[in-house]
Each structure stands twice: as structure tokens, then as C-alpha cells.
């Protein structure tokens, strides 16, 4: 039996992970946060002292890294780097920047592609990232481009970081969001864009609950 797949793409801070996770739970699908995979590899590069944007420095590390994705008793996706649970460690601004840089390397994207496609071949999945509908799962049953204004996304990310006890100001977060948008949309390898046939879901100015209901309704209409 062919498994169903839902691809959700969008810029940094659009709430992809939060809403894709809730969508998967609502539909009984497996949630796959592909951004977390790149973040884990970015963290590995930083720990090894490599420049995440340099292919010559990153390439030798690919044969050494061990990345595993698993679902714990809490039902959430956890990322493991060389056996260590780095689920929280990969959510810092420094690692976010490293992930954006390392994901621009074509050989890195190819290296991680099989892991992502294998999950979709063997499960009903909700997969989110920046090139899921365009590259990873171009034949997904439903494709969504989830976005919001840079200011809205920065407010959400800032609140999330403050809630986790991190000291960071809004202007810094907004500047990071804008810089990442530029890198993601202008990179040579699988740039961020709305996939052909993808439905646009813009959550600017609405609450998380309203955003999720809009996403769920859009997906249900697409799958129908």
C-alpha cells in the first residue's frame, strides 16, 4: 500500500515544526522535522571546529558523523548525535545559522536525502523543511508553503527563545530571520521557493490556533 505524504515548506520561524507536529498528531501520521537533521549536522561541524559553509571542511566530516532520529515516550522527535540527545542543543541561534550554511552545500543535501525519502517510503508522513515539496518529495499528496511576515516570525522566535531562558533581543532575532531568508532563497542548491501545486498558507497576524486550523483545513481539502 502506498503511504501518504504531506510536504510543508517555508521560511525560518514560520512555525513549520510546531504546526507540522500538531498536524501529524491530528492525522495519525509520522512527523519528520528535516530541519532538525541539518541542525544536528551543523552542530557537529561547530563542535569539530569546521566552518559550516565550507565544503572542503565539512566533506571529511560526513564519513564520521552518526545522526539518528527517534521518537521518545513523550511522542516527540529527538535527535541524537553520536549517541547524545541534542534535541535542545540544536535550537540555538548559532546552530540555526550553521544549519542554514551547511544546508547550502549540494553534497550535504544529497548525503541526507536518502534518510528523508526512506521515511516517506515506509510511513505516512508530515515532513517539513525548505525543499520538501520541490526536491525531497516532489510527488507528495499534499504540498504546503507556510509563511508569515518577517516581523511576525521574529516575534514568535524571540518569544520562544525567551521562554527557554535565553537572553536575546528582538532586533537581533529579526536580523537573523532576514539574513536566513536571503541565504535560503538565493542559495544554489535547492533554494527555498513555493513548489508547483503547493497551497500558500500565510499566518501573518493570526494566532497559533487559527494558523493550525487554516493549515488543517487546507490539507484536508487537498487530500480530498
Image (tube, rainbow, N blue to C red):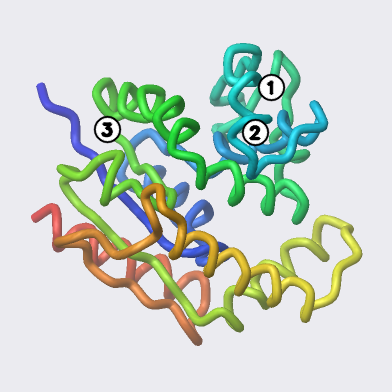
- Report the side of 169 relative to 154 (left or right): right
> Can you tell which quarter of the image residue 38 is in?
top right
**Depth-wise, is mark 3 or mark 1 nearer the camera?**
1
The reply to whether dot 2 and dot 1 touch (C-beta < 8 Å) is yes
Considering only vertical position in the picture, is 118 above or below 43?
A: above
The reply to whether dot 3 and dot 1 touch (C-beta < 8 Å) is no
Q: Local crowd at mark 1 within 10 Å, few (<14), some, or many (≥20)?
A: some
- Report the side of 52 relative to 115 (left or right): right
Distance (Cα) linking label 3 and label 1: 25 Å
- Helix or strand or loop: what does disc 2 sit on? helix
| Residue at horizontal 47 percent and vertical 83 percent from the top | 204
Residue 214, image x and y in percent?
33, 71
Identify the residue under disc 2.
Answer: 40
Considering only vertical position in the picture, is 165 above or below 69?
A: below
Identify the residue under disc 3.
Answer: 124
Residue 195, image x and y in percent?
24, 59
Res. 81 mark = 1
Residue 13, image x and y in percent?
57, 65
Amino acid at each position: 500500500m502506498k503511504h501518504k505524504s504531506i510536504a510543508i515548506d517555508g521560511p525560518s520561524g514560520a512555525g513549520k515544526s510546531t504546526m507540522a507536529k500538531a498536524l501529524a498528531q491530528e492525522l495519525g501520521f509520522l512527523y519528520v522535522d528535516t530541519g532538525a537533521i541539518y541542525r544536528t549536522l551543523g552542530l557537529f561541524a561547530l563542535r569539530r571546529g569546521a566552518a559550516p559553509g565550507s565544503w572542503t571542511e565539512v566533506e571529511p566530516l560526513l564519513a564520521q558523523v552518526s545522526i539518528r532520529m527517534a521518537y521518545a515516550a513523550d511522542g516527540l522527535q529527538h535527535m541524537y548525535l553520536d549517541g547524545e540527545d541534542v534535541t535542545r542543543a540544536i535550537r540555538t541561534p548559532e546552530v540555526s545559522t550553521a544549519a542554514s550554511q551547511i544546508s547550502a552545500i549540494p553534497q550535504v543535501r544529497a548525503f541526507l536525502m536518502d534518510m528523508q525519502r526512506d521515511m516517506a517510503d515506509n510511513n505516512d508522513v508530515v515532513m517539513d523543511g525548505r525543499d520538501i515539496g520541490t526536491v525531497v518529495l516532489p510527488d507528495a499528496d499534499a504540498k504546503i508553503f507556510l509563511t508569515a511576515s518577517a516581523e511576525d516570525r521574529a516575534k514568535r522566535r524571540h518569544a520562544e527563545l525567551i521562554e527557554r531562558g535565553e537572553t536575546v533581543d528582538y532586533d537581533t532575532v529579526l536580523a537573523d530571520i532576514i539574513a536566513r531568508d536571503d541565504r535560503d532563497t538565493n542559495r544554489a542548491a535547492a533554494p527555498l521557493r513555493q513548489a508547483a501545486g503547493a497551497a500558500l498558507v500565510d499566518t501573518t497576524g493570526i494566532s497559533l490556533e487559527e494558523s493550525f486550523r487554516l493549515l488543517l483545513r487546507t490539507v484536508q481539502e487537498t487530500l480530498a
